[in-house]
Image: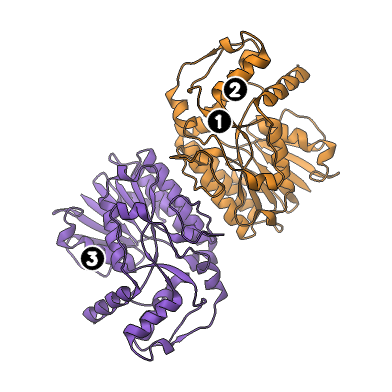
Chain colours: A orange, B purple
Amino acid sequence: MKLLVTGGAGFLGSRLIESLLQPDARDLLPPGARLLSLDLSPCPLRDPRLASVVGDIADRDLLSRLVGPDTALVFHLAAVVSAQAEQDFDLGMAVNLDATRALLEVCRHQARAPRLVFASSLAVFGGELPRQVPEELAPLPQSSYGTQKAMAELLVADYSRRGFVDGRVCRLPTIAVRQGRPNAAASSFASGIIREPLAGLPSNCPVPLDTRLWLSSPGKVIDNLLLAARLDGVRLGPRRALNLPGISVSVGQMLDSLERLGGPGTRGLVGEEPDARVAAIVCGWPGDFEVERAMRLGFVRDSDFDAIVRAYQNEASARA
Amino acid sequence: MKLLVTGGAGFLGSRLIESLLQPDARDLLPPGARLLSLDLSPCPLRDPRLASVVGDIADRDLLSRLVGPDTALVFHLAAVVSAQAEQDFDLGMAVNLDATRALLEVCRHQARAPRLVFASSLAVFGGELPRQVPEELAPLPQSSYGTQKAMAELLVADYSRRGFVDGRVCRLPTIAVRQGRPNAAASSFASGIIREPLAGLPSNCPVPLDTRLWLSSPGKVIDNLLLAARLDGVRLGPRRALNLPGISVSVGQMLDSLERLGGPGTRGLVGEEPDARVAAIVCGWPGDFEVERAMRLGFVRDSDFDAIVRAYQNEASARA
């Protein structure tokens, strides 16, 4: 039996793999099962059950070799992030749409349809938004990234309806606070404005302080991806895409938490120089969602932003 | 200056071309402009301004030759219809998604972004539906045809947002009563149960009589496609897709109209043998829509189903 994690070297992918290797994930990765990471760089984790494949998700032949009749579960996290997909349209289409389609095609041609967890994003929403996004609101992406994710969601749903895969789509909130370094995602600052000052470094907030973000800690996102993998697909019905729970917080409130938990002077490290390119993407995203369905299905969220900052601090000191 | 109609040999395409050749469409097809039809068979119309290209819409090289810097307007109607796309998944993907993308790509690489009118369908909707579908309801296609149309809609919107084309998407109601013969669309019966009995021929109604359909006469659909071409794209805002107006009629009411206008005995020609394959597709489509936005923009609909039948009868006798 085989599990595949695309984007397995990334921030989220490697955390997911770490969790899959824990004893309490034995139902997903039973003894004897192998776990494959596919990414442009090797997964930083080491484990006899883990094989790290370095390659391009857009390489269909490679996908054909990695997915087989014994592939029970695929987590598809590999993606070109928002700001990058906006800058390089063709790259975004090739990875976020075409590679997802190639992966689905490879799954389709297996004797047994693998279960597939696809990481989508709240970036599928945009335009004039209600204060709280309801379950059945039409995606109206205002970025090519959001467009590509919305298209891939439709593919996953149709492939599932036809029985080619058993797919479920998790629309991830903005994830903060991420360990590590800034990335090319437009939402990268949402981690940076906490992580950098906590390390005594300057950071910049490129959007107005009253911008509301829909946030989840990395830990809760991983919990939710694992739950999505365990869920009976029938419980999702035809609507395979789920808006994952998060908390609705303004950037100003995030900085209040920083000062409260990081100590005096930390907030002063955060500049407020606007960046129109980032704001154009992020300020169009919804800042709040109705998540009754996801909560009923057992998905989880953080209690508040202070809890997110504390979890980050604990983890950072544990890893130090 | 050049106009392109894909699917120009089809029922709707050839009617559209006929309308474009009329004097009152001079604003769209001014003196000296050329009109190209692209389809697998030649457009049945003859006019010195019209060139009928026989070829495959999925042939990107051909598209590159047909679209040029002088292409002002493209009507993209070519499609693999619902039942066929359900039966042949790969063909549906190739035509409804890939060819649409290829067409958009060719438009993108012109010096001036052409205006593009894309014919989508109410088949993008499905699942549990409210009595009336609101403007901002999320598509939830229950057929591969609907999925492919919904994906293409997203592409048209993103290409428009980026300025690659100036696109507008018309989600067409079920069109009845069509002249001609049955086709592979799951909704083909909606014309057949009127057209055949009026010609003294038997027909079959494969769905329950209380099935509600969202209908438009071919004439109103053509009026609306022309209006979509004339509309200033700015008036659409980010939501490029419009649910075109129609009327909500049950199949039973359609048969009442048939008897009223076709004379005694016509209804008796319609059998009621269920067809699960057709019902599975058509009964999942919404039967009623909120269309305030489209009406405000000037789109039109028929007054009632009797008017649709009368228009068909007048036309049929005019063509006879």
Chain ID for label 1?
A
**Mark closer to the observer (3, 1):** 1
Chain ID for label 3?
B
**Splitting the image into 4 quarters, where does residue B35 fall?**
bottom left
Q: Secondary structure at mark 2?
A: helix
**Splitting the image into 4 quarters, where does residue A37 fall?**
top right
Q: Amino acid at mark 3?
A: Glu
Tag 3 and tag 1 share a subunit = no
Residue at (57%, 44%) from the top-left corner? A99
Residue lying furthest top in this view?
A265
Position of residue B67 measured from the top left corner of the image (x, y, whole percent): 30, 49
Q: Which residue is mark 2?
A: A254
Q: Are marks 2 and 1 in contact (CB under 8 Å)?
A: yes
Is tag 2's residue or tag 1's residue first in the polypeptide sequence? 1
Residue at (49%, 67%) from the top-left corner? B84
Chain ID for label 2?
A
Is residue A292 something one can see in this rendering? yes
Q: Secondary structure at mark 3?
A: helix
Q: Which residue is mark 1?
A: A213
Position of residue B234 measured from the top left corner of the image (x, y, whole percent): 31, 42
**Mark 2 closeness class: few <14, some 14–19, many ≥20 residues within 10 Å:** many
Tag 2 and tag 1 share a subunit = yes
* Count of marks, rendered view: 3
Q: Which residue is mark 3?
A: B18
Q: Amino acid at mark 1?
A: Leu
Separation of disc 2 and disc 1 at Cα?
Answer: 10 Å
Position of residue B100 measured from the top left corner of the image (x, y, whole percent): 41, 52
